[in-house]
Image (cartoon, grey):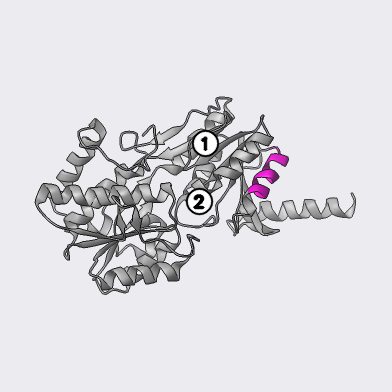
Amino acid sequence: MNKPVQLAAIAALVALTATACGSKPVSTSGSSTSSANAAGSFKACMVTDTGGLDDHSFNAESWAGMQDAAKADSNITVQNATSATENDYASNIAGFVSAQCKLIVTVGFAMNDATVASAKKNPSQNYAIVDNTSTPSQIKGLEFNTAQGAFLGGYFAAGMSKTGKVATFGGANYPTVTVYMDGFWEGVQYYNQKHGTHVQVLGWNETTQQGTFDPTQSFTDQAGGKQIAATFQSEGADIIFPVAGGTGIGALSQAQSSGGKMNAIWVDDDGVISNPQYASVIMTSVTKGIATAVSTAVQEAAKGNFSSTPFVGTLANNGTGLAPYHQFASQVPASLTAQIAAVKQGIINGTIVIKSKSQPKAG
């Protein structure tokens, strides 16, 4: 065995050992890779966006879905590569094409161009993309009409606010971000309509599509998220809904340090589980069923049933919704809980129509 081959073998062994021990993924040339269930013959590979694997949001949820698939089917091997910058998208995807991954899962709206470009170059390669629609015939879109879940979140926030002001902000001005903000805004307006109240939403106006976003657009700027939340708090907001991945953790930090003046609604997953250190300020979360959708897509592909027909998560199929109230359960009036259940049913049966233009077309 020559020296390059020996080094490659050692690197592979180190990566597998680190994964088995639950260590951080091994860094390689600006990206990182990690694998699980190495015995499987169907290799499914995931590329994160710049938020990182441990973003407490959609990258983490996507990886959880990949791992769930490997646990459910011993034939499946899963692996990931993280993207430090957008320049890593194409190279990470190309690396997995070369590694003969049978399904490549890319995470995030921003990865669409790189995913489509790879698909055009590799017509026999199958892909799935989180937060985008199906495009070429070998890309399966995994979309979520989170305007529906966020509508419930907005209604809840309006019902729980003591100051009459709530706030939201985004990590970047993407449709997959503004769809949450639209739904939240509409939910507050609906509450006002039903109750004759005038709860204000700081940070977003669906009518003008103008609002507050993290200037860095990094989804990792916790200091920036904390500052944005502090500004909203100074303006009177007592509940904040950050749609900003890791940047939103900064908003949780501000809420925690506010002395009870501000609480939060988390996004994508149940924030009390993903961010337990901030459980005391997380009232609920607007969830997105990413892990289940990714796991299902991988398992179907492993069984030879890959389809580019898009999946759209809704309230009806549990693709979005509200997480439990956890530590706030005793503070939420039973009447508000009943109203939210009725609003949810109204959205499902179509008597309540959400207007957001960022909604998935099939949603």
- Front residue of 355/39: it is 355
Mark 2, residue position: 59
What residue is rendered at 27% in x and 73% in y?
Answer: 234
Of all residues, the one furthest to the top in this rendering is: 305
Q: Which residues are magenta?
A: 90-100
Mark 1, residue position: 72
Compared with residue 132, is residue 30 higher up or lower down, i.e. above or below? below
Q: Main secondary structure of the magenta part?
A: helix
Compared with residue 76, is residue 247 higher up or lower down, i.e. above or below? below
Q: What separation in Å lies between label 1 and label 2 (alpha carbons)?
A: 20 Å
Q: Could you tell which of marks 1 and 2 lies nearer the N-terminus?
A: 2
What residue is rendered at 61% in x and 44% in y?
Answer: 114
SS of the residue under disc 1 = helix
Residue 226 in picture, x, y percent from top left: 38, 70
Q: Please say whether residue 204 is visible from this viewpoint.
A: yes
Residue type at the position of mark 2: Asn
What residue is rendered at 31% in x and 49% in y?
Answer: 182
167 vs 44, left or right, is left
- Dividing the picture into quarters, in which one does residue 231 lie? bottom left
Residue 143 in picture, x, y percent from top left: 43, 39
- Dividing the picture into quarters, in which one does residue 245 lie? bottom left
Residue 166 in picture, x, y percent from top left: 24, 61
